[in-house]
Amino acid sequence: MSKHEHPTPDTEPASARSKDESLRERLQRNELFEVLDEAELADIEALFEEMEVHPGDYVYHEGDHRNRLFFVRRGRIQVLGNVGEDGKVMLHYRAGNYFGEACLLDDNPHATAGQAQSHCSLWVLTRKRFLDFLSQHPQAGARVLGRASRVVFRRMNAGNISRPGEGLASIYISGDTREETDLLGPIQIPENAYYGVQTMRAVENYDISGIRISHFPNFIKALAMVKKAAAQANHKLGMLSEELANAISQACDDILNGHLHNQFVVDMVQGGAGTSTNMNANEVIANRALEILGEPKGNYERVNPNDHVNMSQSTNDAYPTAFRLAILLSYPSLMESMDDLVLALKDKARQFELVIKMGRTQLQDAVPMTLGQEFNSWAHTIEEDMDRVREAARHFLETNMGGTAIGTGICADPAYPREALRALRRVTSMDFRVSPDMIEASSDTGSLQVFSGVLRRIAVKISKICNDLRLLSSGPRCGFGEINLPPRAPGSSIMPGKVNPVIPEVVNQVAYQVIGNDLTVTMAAENGQLQLNVMEPVIVFNIFQSIDMLTRAFNTLRRLCIEGITANEEHCREMVMHSIGLVTAMMPYIGYKKSSQVAKEALETGKPVADLVREKGWATEEQIREILDPQNMIAPVSLKDRRGNGF
């Protein structure tokens, strides 16, 4: 059972309000006990007791052994997780719900606590009494246990395939269901679920990545914004009544305020070009709108996911508009993390501006530079890509809303694209524009390819920086040893004292993932046929993942690595002064031939370059000191006067 909070809208549906229903009626329609005949039902009914609970009282505590099955007759029970810490509310049981069915199977401890939020009237069956029933009616008891096992398995399986903290287990807790039907036939939906039959089909069909659309909150918010804009446009055109438009808009606002995100349960990777995601949004919004109107979930005659929430839309314009909007909502976090890293690198550049070191090309000594110059170059290359991201993101402000199925606008009013655009601008505060060619826009993924390519470019660059950090910090005694990375973890289970550059290593791996994601985007973009690219779900998933992973990687690299780097200044200077690369600084003054001779002899004898030039009389002590002055080696200097002085 998840121990995280699931915000619940304050409005309670009519179907969840107090009911004057007998225990026998409850048992007859309950999936645990509907397998019993009338005589067996009478026997099990006689084992239940009535229980009254006052507000604030607990019906069970975290750690208590499971020993009671509860049916809520009246009132409201809240389930609390992390009771010893902040006591977060996970979900609520209302009249008509039951809970505690696992006690029929075992008496393991509760992982949560149940507390009365209002005055409650409960029917209670103890584990002991059920075991007595099982001994007297073994076949009937076995049927009940089979149903209880199915409910518990369903709940646990749902929790396992969901995002931590937003598990489907919270939906299945009560075990009660409602029946919904689509063209394939009827299907049972958890009674307190806000999604419906098409979402349930998708949950059954697409257990692929294990990552649900609820993993990306900005995607859910974007879907709500698109649906709200559509409702407002349809109302403006006289297609949707004010009552329904307001209920749909309020449902969308609930989602925008963070409610019901755990109801978005479809896998990110799915067939159908995003239809399952679109219908998941349509059904959740429709059922929340029904609640707002005082109607039970599933009463689609009143508010219909297709006819009302999806009015004037197709998945093929609503879904692309939503995921483009989601990228626009998400990428600023990446920009912020990149900017923070740039500032940290520039701060280190200033700190190391006087640390002279040897630059290298092809891993060989090249010419001197400062460590500050190296860090500043890293800052600049990241800063440069921030502009590329902004340029690529601007293409997502073009929408095909109103194009519906393939861009021809079928099933939408001719004025709908204009009104939908106005509404979308109001809802998002973004300057969207309608595509000049809706048919092209319905199948084109060019903007996604460009954006993913920029993310790949960023990944390649940050990986190169991390490679450099690992080289420069290698050692500590037998490597470059120019800088020290802050130690973050013991580096070996067998080599004592070893500390590895784990933060650059993990960022390298993020880069490889992003590069692979871009290849997936490329292949999926190429494989779309005719008027629709059905591979958009995997394109979107990979772009969302790349944004998220890069954002976290930049923050991690800055906070746990860059900000704590120190320089081994004396070691850097010593390597410069003993490097053959110094001969390059002498070359404009003594010529290429003599410089090559000095380099060869220095390599063979191990003598410093300065000593060899001095021994050969090719420069005076003062001239050598001036030529090899660090400030004269890290930036261009005028050579005219020196050539005229006999160099």
Image (tube, helix red, strand yellow):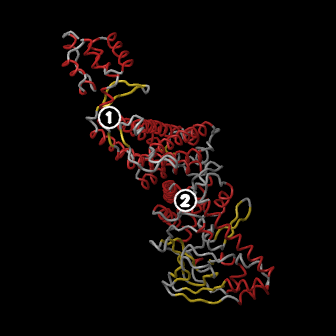
Mark 2 Cα shell of 10 Å, populated few (<14), some (14-19), many (≥20): some
- Secondary structure, mark 1, is helix
Q: Which of 438 and 153 is in front in this view?
A: 153
Instruction: Check disc 2 and give the amino acid type.
Output: Met
Displayed quadrant of residue 408: top right
- The reply to whether the C-beta atoms of the residues labelled 1 and 2 are less than 8 Å apart is no
**On screen, residue 599 above or below 296:** above
Relative horizontal placement of residue 221, taking residue 203 as reference (left or right): left
Q: Which of 122 and 291 is in front in this view?
A: 122
- Secondary structure, mark 2, is loop
Q: Which residue lies furthest to the front in this view?
A: 605
State the image coordinates of residue 537 (x, y, percent, origin top left). 59, 47
Q: Which of 304 and 101 is in front in this view?
A: 101
State the image coordinates of residue 171 (x, y, percent, origin top left). 60, 68
Cα separation, mark 1 vs mark 2, equals 76 Å
Query: Which residue is identified by label 2?
Result: 239
Residue drawn at (60%, 64%), measured in percent from left and top? 168
Instruction: Check disc 1 and give the amino acid type.
Output: His
Relative horizontal placement of residue 480, taking residue 304 as reference (left or right): left
Mark 1 Cα shell of 10 Å, populated few (<14), some (14-19), many (≥20): some
Q: Which of 13 and 25 is in front in this view?
A: 25
State the image coordinates of residue 396 (x, y, percent, origin top left). 47, 44
Q: Which residue lies furthest to the right in this view?
A: 139
**On screen, residue 32 above or below 181:** below
Residue drawn at (27%, 20%), measured in percent from left and top? 610
Relative horizontal placement of residue 25, taking residue 402 as reference (left or right): right
Which numbered disc, 1 or 2, marks the residue that appears first in the sequence? 2
State the image coordinates of residue 290 (x, y, percent, origin top left). 56, 69
Quadrant into which the C terminus falls: top left
**Residue 571 image label:** 1
Quadrant into which the N terminus falls: bottom right
Residue drawn at (43%, 53%), measured in percent from left and top? 428
